[in-house]
Amino acid sequence: MALKLDLIDWFSSLSLFKQFFSILLLGPPDAGSRQAGGSDCGDGWYVPHLLGEVRERQRRVAREEGLAFWDWAAAMGGRCAASQWRLGERMRGDHVHFTRDGGDRIGGLIDADFNRALQDTGLAPPAPPGRRRP
């Protein structure tokens, strides 16, 4: 509950800015831990305990405060995606930090989602001459 209250207090302090700017709250990425307690990914790695709860509290605060929310873990492929990202060398051996390729992939995913959201809302600027929007 403390996390939710801290987030609400912090975003409430930004109320002046919310009048002029959109705010996007990034949920945590999927990650892995060797410590049992979270969901078992079947390869000796587990989803960190409470990571899903943190994500859901952030999602709830975003909804209550009128913020956009990007589900980083879902963009990666959902629960236990960190193991697949590690196999694809997009995540380091700790199943927490991304490689350069992983960072590039995340950048591409969020960029595509931004562009899709802009197009869905009719706010997308026209593509530069000679280029198509993704």
Image (cartoon, rainbow, N blue to C red):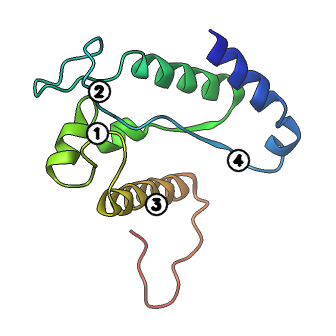
Find residue 125 and report its horizontal and vertical position in percent: 60, 71
Q: Amino acid at mark 4?
A: Ser
N-term-proximal mark, 4 vs 2: 4
Which residue extends farthest bottom? 130
Find residue 59 and report its horizontal and vertical position in percent: 54, 26
Q: Amino acid at mark 1?
A: His
Q: Which element carries disc 2, helix, strand or loop? A: loop
Q: Which element carries disc 4, helix, strand or loop? A: loop
- State the residue at coordinates (45%, 16%): 53
- Rounded to the nearest angstrom, the CA distance separating label 1 from label 3 is 23 Å
- Rounded to the nearest angstrom, the CA distance separating label 2 from label 3 is 28 Å
N-term-proximal mark, 1 vs 3: 1
Mark 1 or mark 4, whichever is nearer to me: 1
Q: Give whichever of 80, 94 is nearer the camera.
A: 94
- The disc placed on residue 33 is 2
N-term-proximal mark, 2 vs 1: 2
Q: Quadrant of the C terminus?
A: bottom left
Judge the density around disc 1: few (<14), some (14-19), many (≥20) Cα neighbours within 10 Å: many
Q: Is residue 78 left or right of residue 122?
A: left
Q: Is residue 116 above or below residue 35?
A: below
Q: Quadrant of the N terminus?
A: top right
- The disc placed on residue 22 is 4
Task: Find disc 3 in the rendering and name its residue.
Answer: 111
Find residue 91 and report its horizontal and vertical position in percent: 28, 49
